[in-house]
Image (tube, grey):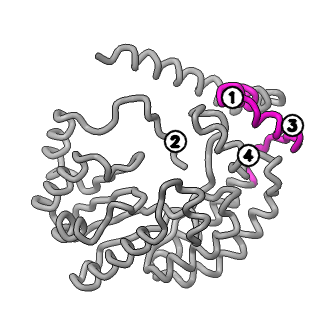
């Protein structure tokens, strides 16, 4: 559920690749995120170089969907790295929910890859390899939160979660936001009290995680409750929401933004103007590219 602009050039240029390679010796923490960083050849080039020159205090972290972390790739690219972390997006604890949310994702492949990584971690004594389960809370998976924490414990993973964020931008995501963002939209039928109850029910399961993962996960869950209580919800009647869903993405985004400023807080007005400003700047920069 992370917004990504597919209309602008992606990946690293040769010049950027060389700069990163040259900087590795002086960095303690190197993180890759996206999109999906593992689909780019430049990622594997950097990791291969990192494996050759890294010091044990240097940490490589990658946020990924986990589908390309096969046993063969783990053995080829990562066995020479001692301090390694993967944040792997699950967003579910069952195959059905996972494959509905993460379109084209394969639950069986994901679980197999995680199992293989754990086998390699145990076989080669990689005590500083960490796997973190990522879980974006939304309407489709709220009631799998507890099960996801228990699955993370079973897979010897840490656990991190957060609310689905966004309402009007980027426009290509607006329909998903409007049908999944239970923190922002009241018409989805999920109250703050329900979110809080689900989190409270899930909290005891944190004790099943490995000790070093417990406190961060607990703090994370309590933060979700604070976000739920602190987010101003847009009150939209169900009938009106159904009419809005018949609009184009652009019109839907405009309508939501208009509703957000009908009874404005200063922060909401600023956010709307900031989104528009960023969009205009982005368009100008795009026009300036050769």
Q: Where does label 1 land, which residue?
A: 248
Q: Decide which of tag 2 and tag 1 comes sooner along the chain.
A: 2
Residue tagged 2: 3
The 10 Å Cα crowd at callout 3, few under 14, some 14 to 19, many 20 or more, is few
Marks 2 and 3, the one that precedes in the sequence: 2
Q: Which residue is mark 4?
A: 184
Are the two marked residues, 2 and 1, in contact with CB atoms closer than 8 angstroms? no
Whether the magenta-drawn stretch holds residue 238 is answered as yes
Q: Earlier in the sequence, mark 4 or mark 3?
A: 4
Give percent across and percent down for residue 208.
54, 84
Of label 1 and label 3, which has the lower sequence position? Answer: 3
The earlier-in-sequence mark between 2 and 4 is 2
Residue 199 sits above or below residue 211 on the image = above
Circle 4: is it few (<14), some (14-19), or many (20+) Cα within 10 Å? many
Disc 2 vs disc 4: which is toward the camera? 2
Callouts 4 and 3 close, C-beta under 8 Å: no
Question: Considering the numbered disc 3 on the image, is that residue within a helix, a strand or a loop?
Answer: helix
Q: Which circle, 2 or 1, is nearer the viewer?
A: 1
Q: Label 2, label 1: how many angstroms apart (C-alpha)?
A: 18 Å
Tell me the SS state at disc 1.
loop
What is the number of callouts on the image? 4
For discs 2 and 3, the disc positioned in front in the rendered view: 3
Give the distance between the C-alpha atoms of the residues marked 2 and 4, in whole angstroms.
Answer: 17 Å
Label 1, label 3: how far apart the Cα atoms are: 15 Å
Measured as percent of width and height from the top left, residue 248 is found at 69, 28
Mark 4 falls on what kind of element? loop
């Amino acid at each position: 559920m992370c917004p990504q602009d597919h209309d602008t050039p992606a990946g690293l240029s040769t010049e950027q690749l060389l700069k990163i390679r040259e900087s590795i010796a002086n960095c303690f923490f190197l993180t890759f995120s996206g999109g999906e960083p593992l689909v780019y050849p430049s990622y594997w080039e950097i990791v291969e170089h990192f494996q050759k020159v890294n010091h044990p205090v240097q940490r490589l972290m990658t946020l990924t969907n986990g589908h390309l972390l096969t046993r063969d790739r783990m053995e080829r690219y990562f066995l020479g790295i001692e301090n390694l972390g993967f944040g792997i997006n699950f967003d579910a604890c069952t195959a059905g929910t996972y494959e509905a949310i993460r379109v084209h994702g394969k639950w069986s492949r994901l679980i197999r890859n995680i199992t293989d990584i754990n086998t390699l971690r145990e076989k080669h004594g990689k005590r500083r390899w960490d796997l973190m389960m990522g879980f974006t809370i939304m309407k489709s998976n709220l009631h799998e939160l507890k099960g996801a924490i228990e699955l993370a414990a079973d897979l010897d993973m840490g656990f991190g979660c957060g609310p689905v964020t966004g309402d009007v931008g980027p426009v290509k995501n607006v329909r998903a936001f409007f049908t999944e963002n239970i923190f922002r939209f009241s018409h989805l039928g999920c109250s703050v009290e329900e979110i809080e109850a689900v989190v409270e029910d899930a909290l005891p399961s944190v004790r099943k995680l490995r000790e070093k993962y417990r406190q961060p996960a607990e703090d994370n869950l309590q933060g979700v409750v604070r976000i739920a209580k602190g987010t101003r919800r847009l009150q939209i009647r169900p009938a009106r929401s159904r009419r809005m869903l018949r609009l184009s993405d652009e019109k839907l985004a405009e309508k939501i933004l208009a509703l957000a400023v009908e009874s404005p807080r200063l922060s909401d007005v600023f956010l709307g103007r900031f989104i528009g400003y960023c969009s205009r700047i982005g368009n100008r920069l795009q026009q300036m590219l050769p």
